[in-house]
Amino acid sequence: MNAVTIADVAALAGVSESTVSRALSMSRPVGAAVQNRVRAAASELGYSGNSIARALRKQKTDTVGMVVPSILNPFFTTLVDSMENALLADGKQLFLCDSRQDPALEAHHLRLLIERHVDGIVISPVDSTASTVAIAAAARSVPLVQLDRHVDVENTDWVGIDDAEAMKLVLTHLRSTGVRSAAFVTSQLTNSSTEQRLAGFRLHAAALGIQVNDDWVVLGDYSVDSGDFAAQRLIAAPQRPEAIVCADDLIAFGVLRACREAGLRVPEDVQVTGFDNIVFSEHVTPSLTSIDQPTARMASETLRLLALRTKDRDSQGGANVSLKPRLVVRNSTRPVQR
Amino acid sequence: MNAVTIADVAALAGVSESTVSRALSMSRPVGAAVQNRVRAAASELGYSGNSIARALRKQKTDTVGMVVPSILNPFFTTLVDSMENALLADGKQLFLCDSRQDPALEAHHLRLLIERHVDGIVISPVDSTASTVAIAAAARSVPLVQLDRHVDVENTDWVGIDDAEAMKLVLTHLRSTGVRSAAFVTSQLTNSSTEQRLAGFRLHAAALGIQVNDDWVVLGDYSVDSGDFAAQRLIAAPQRPEAIVCADDLIAFGVLRACREAGLRVPEDVQVTGFDNIVFSEHVTPSLTSIDQPTARMASETLRLLALRTKDRDSQGGANVSLKPRLVVRNSTRPVQR
DNA sequence: ATGAAAGCGCTAACAT
DNA sequence: ATGTTAGCGCTTTCAT
């Protein structure tokens, strides 16, 4: 067991506890000789500090809580990875919480994080409405920034991409390949990203003169099977869209599968696009045209905002950092016409 | 800000701090009337406790640290998910650390976790040799169990699957489809799982009379591209194995891609198997025959061992919990011959 | 059943 | 530059 405390080090080095604290944290100048003796004593005893005691005293834990709808979704995995990496540089550590698409569990996690006195919370809310109360409550106790998805709550910042702009990139690309009609497959409209992607799709399809039939917007969930199912319906219908635009890559994978099984060639017979550019999108066949989210940048912006809020707890009003998405063209869409 | 302390609640309820503590934690009987007054006062003030102070006093943080080689690998994502879920039931929270395949970073994370006084550490070591020192040091301060991969260190438990048994399942299945020769594509032999899978492959191939040429064991890394590259070599060689057995699903995806591009049909021309049964293995084409690891069970066993060690810190010698793997047969292998 | 007091390990005022 | 003291918020003896 590691029962070595600062008192042990102080005793061995023949100085006071404060001096040990100062020498080790370099929070104040300490005599060179003493410095060395303390260092030696600490390493001899294998002293490693106690962040719990330090946290209690300094009212700062050097931890951040992150709450995501599902770590199993590769997009959120990437986001978690980026956050963990960004935190590393700050010497902070990450409490990972998975809300499993459940607003009640999400609220529970938020409560626990508050009790743990994390220095900040990063959350991608499960539901536009059901998540608001718990998030508002949490934001009252600690700096909180919403990442990717967000709900309408005062006193929180948001970091994400411009979803409408992303749909514009997708549709402009499709239009340039000659597409005149397109369907949209997405999840239920229970969160902000989903809503804005659909709105963006509608807006830019209209602007570009791309036809969208009423029953060409299909709502399921963010999963391969859901995309497969939706595509089967679209394929079976009397008129088929020239392109199927998907709200995330998982859905797109399902669409690709349905097309393959229906004997439709992608992109010759129908073009398909995804969203998020998860790792596998370059490994499926055909490789998937998708929207890349700058997750590393998103993570660093998130930490920047968290730090800002920590410094100035009373700064009102949320900052919204909307980053530019990037279109990654692969083989599920046709070459641009000239 | 949440500056409500137990003293505030005590004052409002007109009792001592001790009584509030007892009433709220029910650690000792408390008069019914007092109980109610305390409850009321606490909720009126929005008191939510301070786990830092509690941890300092109780010498117990209700946190567990988990260190994985890469959260971006879907298998470890699943493992993290299972752990987070199992922890939830115990009211504990998870510090997630990604060692990014780097033993030095892994050691750094372990040090931080020790300082944080986590109640236990769960780790999948990066490297058979380079990881040992840091793990041994950590295991001296806190209960530690190795999950999936492991290194040879005293005083640690291990939970994983029987890798050799898994290879037996794979090869027995392949043999029953008529396979007479097989290659093995894996990563460099820098960790226990990888070593044991190869050993199991060799052992059972020999036992079943499956031919394995010297240059049919290819060492790369756990990635799609590495599998692709290895398969290209195998395909180009004068004699081609009837089956390509892969040490994980990512490698297998790469092998499938290489086969497709070489015009080889799977499973007609060559059979392919994966390992880990990650979610995508059922969504690729052809769907992948793989080995399923019981991650939920692995997580609960891990927590059980951690709890055991916590109770009895001096229990020597490691427990090894080796769970049975399960073969999931899909379309990348042929039907069994009769 | 309740209260008073001590103390977990650390850092920051306040001395000197 | 170093030591002394107090106290972060809580739980737990030890009293009563």
Image (cartoon, coloured by chain):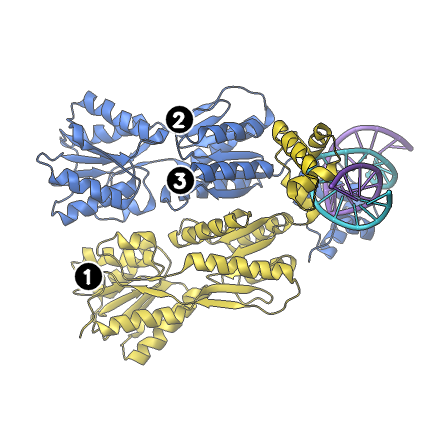
Chain colours: A blue, B yellow, C purple, D cyan
Q: Which residue is mark 3?
A: A101
Q: Amino acid type of disc 3?
A: Gln
Coordinates of residue B85 in the picture (x, y in percent): 47, 49
Q: Position of residue A180 (x, y in %)?
A: 13, 28
Q: Is residue A144 above or below residue B110?
A: above
Q: What is the CA distance from the residue labelled 2 to the residue labelled 1?
A: 45 Å
Q: Secondary structure at mark 3?
A: loop
What's under tag 1, amino acid-wise? Val
Q: For mark 2, what is the residue?
A: A322
For marks 2 and 3, the one nearer the N-term is 3
Q: Is residue B91 visible to the viewer in this orientation of the structure?
A: yes
Q: Residue at x 25, y 27 (%)?
A: A201
Quarter occupied by residue A78: top left
Is residue A32 visible in this depiction of the protein? no
Q: Is residue A314 above or below residue B279?
A: above
Can you give x and y, in whole percent of width and height, for residue B92 in the image?
A: 56, 48
Q: Please name which of the two marks, 1 or 3, marks the residue nearer to the observer.
A: 3
Left or right of residue B143: residue A274: left
Per the image, the residue denoted by label 1 is B266
CA neighbours of label 1 inside 10 A, class few (<14), some (14 to 19), many (20+): many
Q: Residue furthest front?
A: B32
Callout 3: chain: A
